[in-house]
Amino acid sequence: MLVETKNASLDTMSVTIQALHVSGKQMTLAVFRQVPAKHPFMPDGTLIPEMQLWGRVRYAMKDETDSWLVASLEGVLYRCSYAQKYLDSPDRYAREWTEAKSILETYIVNEPLAVALEDWDKRQEKLPWEQRRSSYYSGLKIPDWWPSKTKTGNRKYYEDEVDLCYQSWLAAKKREENCIVINELPQLFIAV
């Protein structure tokens, strides 16, 4: 599509810039670097409820993020790192959750086998040395992933792992949602 110059025009529009001021003076990058850093998220992925969100600052600091949330908590101003690339991915936690569920299912299936192996070993220990046979030759074999033969009866351990992975996934999803909210905050201007 061709646009003819007779149909195009230039218009002047006003832009609102929000600048961060401290004691009546515009904050500089040197002062911003001295503002204490704080993690803005609670363990469940929600933002700290008492925290008042001021805006965002795009400024790269060496070995740190380039996306900052400026917020206050109990009368103190903080810079909070929230860059998504530095947060744990919900996809990673989803994979861990799936893996933990798979291990739990395998555990449930193989627990009777492990119990049988433990019983076999106990019976073998009671026999004289020359009559003992290892469980490897008996046709019973522990799965490769099994932590140890003494882990039987620890179904709760694996169920807790599944629950922990699920909770971590929920927290990562909540952090991701909160990052979207943070990205909608105004960008603050800081003087060089």
Image (cartoon, rainbow, N blue to C red):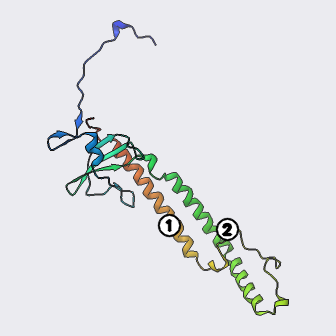
Report, in whole angstroms, how far the alpha carbon at label 2 lies from the one at label 1: 20 Å
Above or below residue 189? Residue 36 is below
Where is the C terminus found, in terms of image quarters? top left
Q: Residue at x 55, y 74 (%)?
A: 157
| Side (left or right) of 178 relative to 85 | left
Q: How many marks?
A: 2
Give the crowd class for mark 2: few <14, some 14-19, many >=20 residues within 10 Å.
few
Q: Residue at x 39, y 49 (%)?
A: 177
Q: Residue at x 45, y 58 (%)?
A: 170
Q: Which mark is residue 145?
A: 2
> What percent of the width, then of the height, locates residue 54?
25, 46
Q: Nearer the viewer, mark 2 or mark 1?
A: 2
Extreme right residue here?
130
> What percent of the width, then of the height, locates residue 90?
49, 53
Amino acid beneath label 1: Asp
Q: Which mark is residue 94?
A: none
Q: Earlier in the sequence, mark 2 or mark 1?
A: 2
Above or below residue 70? Residue 3 is above
Give the crowd class for mark 1: few <14, some 14-19, many >=20 residues within 10 Å.
some
Q: Nearer the viewer, residue 103 or 71?
A: 71
> What percent of the width, then of the height, locates residue 179?
38, 47
Q: Which residue is mark 1?
A: 163
Question: What secondary structure is marked by label 1?
Answer: helix
Question: What secondary structure is marked by label 2?
Answer: loop
Q: Residue at x 42, y 49 (%)?
A: 176
Q: Nearer the viewer, residue 133 or 91?
A: 133
Q: Quadrant of residue 31?
A: top left
> What percent of the width, then of the height, locates residue 69?
32, 46
Extreme top residue here?
6
Above or below residue 70? Residue 48 is below
Amino acid beneath label 2: Trp
Q: Quadrant of residue 5?
A: top left
